[in-house]
Amino acid sequence: MHHGRKKRAIKRPRPIRELQQRPETDVITGHFEHDFQALSDLLTNSSDLRTSIIRTQDGKRVALFFYAGLINQQILNQNVIHPIQKHAAPLTAETLLQRIIKSPTGEMEKSLTTLATVLAKGAAVILMEGLDRAITVTLPQFHDRGIERSQSEDVLIGPHHSFGEDLNKNLGLLRRYLSSPRLKIRTVQLGRISKSDVAIVYIEGVAQEKLVKEAEERLKRIDIDIIPGVSYLIEFLEDQPFTLLPQLKPTERPDRVLGALSEGRIAIMAEGDPTCLIAPFFLPETMQSAEDYYEKPLVATFLRWLRLLSAGFSIFLPGVWITLASFHHGIIPPTLFNSIVAGREDVPFPTIIEAFLLLIAFDIVIEASTRLPSAVGQAVGIVGAIILGQSAVQASLISPTMTIVVALSGLAVYTLPSPSSVSAIRVLKYFVLGLSSLLGLFGTIWAFIFITIKAVSMRSFGYPAVFPVAPFNIRGWIDIFLKLPNTMLKRRPHFLAAENEKRLTEGVTPYPGKDGSRETKDPSS
Amino acid sequence: MKQKTLVHSLQAALVIFASTIGTVYFPLAAVLIPFVSTASWYVVLIAFLLTTLWTLLSTWLAKQAPAGNFGVAVETWLGPILGKVFLLWFAAYWFLLSIGVLSEVSFVFHIVALPATPIGVLQVAFLFLVIYTDLYGIETCIRNIQALLMLAIPLMLSFLLTAFAAARWTNLLPLLDASLVDMVKATYYISPYPLAGILTTLFLAVQVQDQEQIGIKSVLFHWLAGLLLALIVAVTIAVLGCCVTESYVYPTIPLAQSINIGDTLVGVEILVYPLWLLSGYIKSAIAFVIASATVAALFPAFKQPWRAWGLGLIVLVVAMLPANLREVGRLLNICNFHLGIPFYLVIPVIAIGVKLKKGRKQHAK
């Protein structure tokens, strides 16, 4: 007798009716009228569905099904309809596929449900009288915005390309930059209704197989009706979805994805979304921008320090300010304290309320300027920052020092190149401010320790999320504070790489060799 | 993905360092000066050099037991009955230490920085962090301490640097101002401080992946902690002088308050208050997590989250009993001298027992 705890069965949602009407038999029978009717019934109530019946030279009927917006109709006419009409000899399925429709995407299919799915993905379905199989030809024509500059991760130096909404085009973009057969793509179809393609991209021999399998398993576990985009999947893929801090890195930039792939990470992309998720993602990488690798090392190092300082300012500055101004005045030098008091003389609110009100006002202005078109957005920013701020100070509603603190804290966060981290920090500062308002410096430090516990407990695809701080790794740790020259970045993160940890061959630097074999040439000689 | 335990020897050594330093550097100078006056700083070094033997014994013992579980290791050394007694004693030490540190940190912060806030609020808030750490387990606790050290060490060094600027090194003279008997007495009184590091070594050395490295690293970090404490004691005496230092329970706080370099570098308490809270959290979290893990080895049915919340409730009740800092000190003395010092006798005895048992086994073979 089995005494162990009963294994809990995974509850799957009830299957929903995917299509309007299910045919009695799900296969092409070879009986033209019946098959035509069955497929038409399956696709009923779609005004963009086009059906037409043409005849071959020997009088056989050929039915065509396609969705108007998904098919390049000119190519369909040229490569499919005209050749069928002109062909003199009797047609078989093989002749139709191999000699007449000269498209590499042509396939034979028997299942009516599969035919309905491929139709929705941009294929034309051809039913021919007397044939017990249908032929599908993919001739997609999507209207997307093409390859544009990245809006959220723009840089001054380096590539400007960003992904679009078409998955194949995005994958093609990666292939164009990384022309190697070792760039592998595994596709998983998700969404009971949407049947969206989700791709896992990695470099064979560089990424660990267990990481790729883990991603595949996590994706396959998702049983949902529609996938609007890969960004929607973040919470399904994260190890701790309720945590504020990000555990996957969303990016729109192909160069960032390639950089991540070359370190042994994987990328997850989906149809209809320009965002690509990089896994695993380590929190200290929030301070690193794609631009760092195109800048001079010293400049990039300075920028990293600036971002670290900015992150600290945005999370802790309002809280620390409240702490000093309301709880521990003794620590502030007397001259500074006097000027703070003088500035607050006519302000009717306590410092804590003043800080909360101003922070919320600042976030309202930011949110409004983000949602508005860029030209209007800038104007709203100016109105919000200068006119409202200035007026509020003049009306003695807020003090000038608090305006500076809130503005610095609010703006500093935007030096971080990762939008997901920016959102997390915008919320975290309220948490720190709240605790600092209640418990002074004790509250600020309490909040800091709490955030640290939460961060170190996080994992990204099973890897500790605050690597290389904890667990400590000297090479990675140096990389947080110093951007070493690209010629010195010789190894991949040690526990990410598969068997191949080295990424740069020795002796490729342009410096003269010790033995004098590669001495700098005299330009005059 | 199956999560690997990622406790490496370096991580363990950092925790040993943190648990040795803890909040010790706040009262240490005041504890030593009544016995050895200006010789206090090198008495710290002597104490840490002498106790190196116990660190080495702890790592040697860890290698004699199957890696991974402290409870199993203790049972291997002492057998099931004595092992349980040892575990109970070990848990009691850490449990009381956690309570003591928690009370001490809350009391001192309440007195010096937040007199209007009820002490119970500080204790509950602080305890919540400790319980929360325990809920995530030993691995997260270790990683958290590593991450916090990244802030605590620069803060401590900045504080020391500012204090250096205000130091009058002649305060450390005469150098040999203590008799041998006084030095032995002083060494005895500060011996509980390295003990926390030694017992952390005993607990963690069993659980590290690369055990061959733990011996050298734990000794190195044990010495490093001793060196840092000696430096803090020397700087405190150099800035405040022996008489003033002796008159305070926690001389590091007046040390920070007294620093005023050209009316520009003032208000150094801003570095000391966070340090006090960070150190307090680190020490009490290590103590609580080790106590909780030892309780888990003793009573496997007492699982998380009930264990963390249950033990936390007891900690809260006991931590609220002391009415003032003097009573907290008494509680810490019971922990350090009644429960702690006997470990100095027991660890070598266990090591000898294990060695004899091993020799007998080899002889039988």
Image (tube, coloured by chain):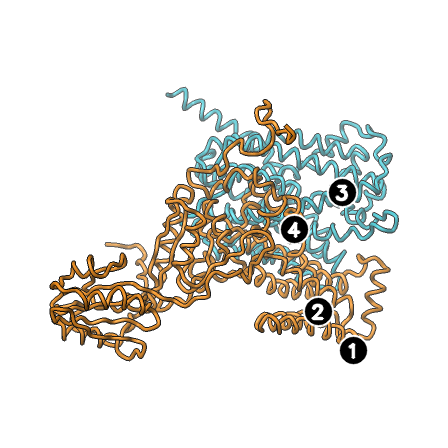
Chain colours: A orange, B cyan
Q: Are marks 3 and 1 in contact (CB under 8 Å)?
A: no
Q: Is residue A95 left or right of residue B327?
A: left
Picture layout, residue A502 above or below residue B306: above
Q: Are marks 1 and 4 in contact (CB under 8 Å)?
A: no
Q: Does dot 1 land on a helix, a strand or a loop? A: loop
Spatial CA distance of label 3 from label 1 is: 45 Å
Q: Chain of mark 4?
A: A
| Front position among marks 3 and 1 | 1
| Front position among marks 3 and 2 | 2
User: Which image quadrant: the C terminus of chain A?
Assistant: top right
Q: Chain of mark 2?
A: A
Q: Position of residue B286 (x, y in %)?
A: 58, 47
Kindly identify the amino acid type of the residue bearing the numbered disc 2. Answer: Ala
First in sequence, mark 2 or 4: give its number: 4
Q: Position of residue A288 (x, y in %)?
A: 58, 51
Are tags 3 and 1 found on a single chain? Answer: no
- Asked if one can make out residue B251 in the rendered structure from this viewpoint, the answer is yes
**Mark linked to residue B160:** 3
Q: Does dot 3 land on a helix, a strand or a loop? A: helix
Spatial CA distance of label 3 from label 2 is: 34 Å
| Quadrant in which residue B31 is drawn | top right
Residue matched to label 4: A303
Spatial CA distance of label 4 from label 3 is: 28 Å
Q: Residue at x 70, y 30 (%)?
A: B46
